[in-house]
Amino acid sequence: MRVAVYGGSFNPPHKSHAMVASWIPRSGAADMVWLMPVFEHAFEGMHEKHLAPFSERMRWCSQLAASLGPTVQVSDVESLLPAPSYTVDTLQFLALRYPKHSFRLVIGADILQQTQSWKSWDVIAENFSPIVVGREGYENADSLYPDAPVFPAVSSTEVRERLMQGKSVDDLVPDAIAASLRESHPWKL
């Protein structure tokens, strides 16, 4: 089975995450998507990266996956690896643990410029055939990935900011996530 590994903070997941996860199996880029929240972000404390508890982000991702159907699942594999787990380590772990599957990494065109600072990006690019998706308002690296679809520029940061201001996030997050966020949001920024 071809599995698209869609990692990220998911702090919280939003509608663009849902659109990407839904699009991948329909596009034929992979048979299944595994949403994979980071256990501890490699950049925690930098770039304003402060994460809600892993259990909460897993719950949100499970709610998202349930709303998208059987081709989208959630994996807690990052909680099993030494923290912080770098993308290449996670992908290599998955390849060893699930030898009958092939894995592809989902990556946004908005962070392509950052990949040169990633641990072993060349290994990822060579062995885990990235699925590049565009993000509205960002350079899409058309020369490298001319067929990358472009998804709305929604960010988890914007969702958190609205929540802290007491504003609605219903237009930014799937219904199941909105209901959960109305009940409680665990971060204190």
Image (cartoon, rainbow, N blue to C red):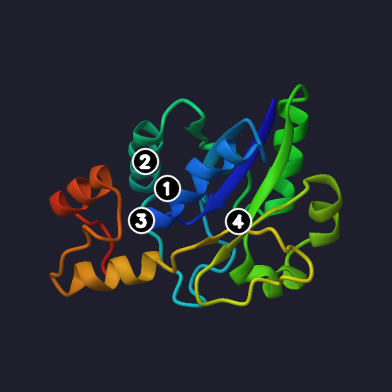
Relative to 83, 143 lies left or right = right
Upstream in the sequence, badge 1 or badge 4? 1
Upstream in the sequence, badge 3 or badge 2? 3
Look at discs 1 and 4 and give the one toward the viewer.
1
* Secondary element at tag 1: helix
Residue 86 vs 154, above or below: the answer is: above
Amino acid identity at mark 1: Ala
* Secondary element at tag 3: loop
Residue at image x 71%, y 72%? 141
Circle 1 sits on which residue? 18
Residue 53, given in percent of the width and then of the height, sits at 36, 52
Pointers 1 and 4 in contact (CB under 8 A)? no
Residue at image x 72%, y 70%? 142
- For the residues marked 2 and 1, what is the alpha-carbon distance in whole angstroms? 7 Å
Pointers 4 and 2 in contact (CB under 8 A)? no
Residue 139, given in percent of the width and then of the height, sits at 62, 77
Circle 3 sits on which residue? 12
Circle 4 sits on which residue? 84
Circle 2 sits on which residue? 64
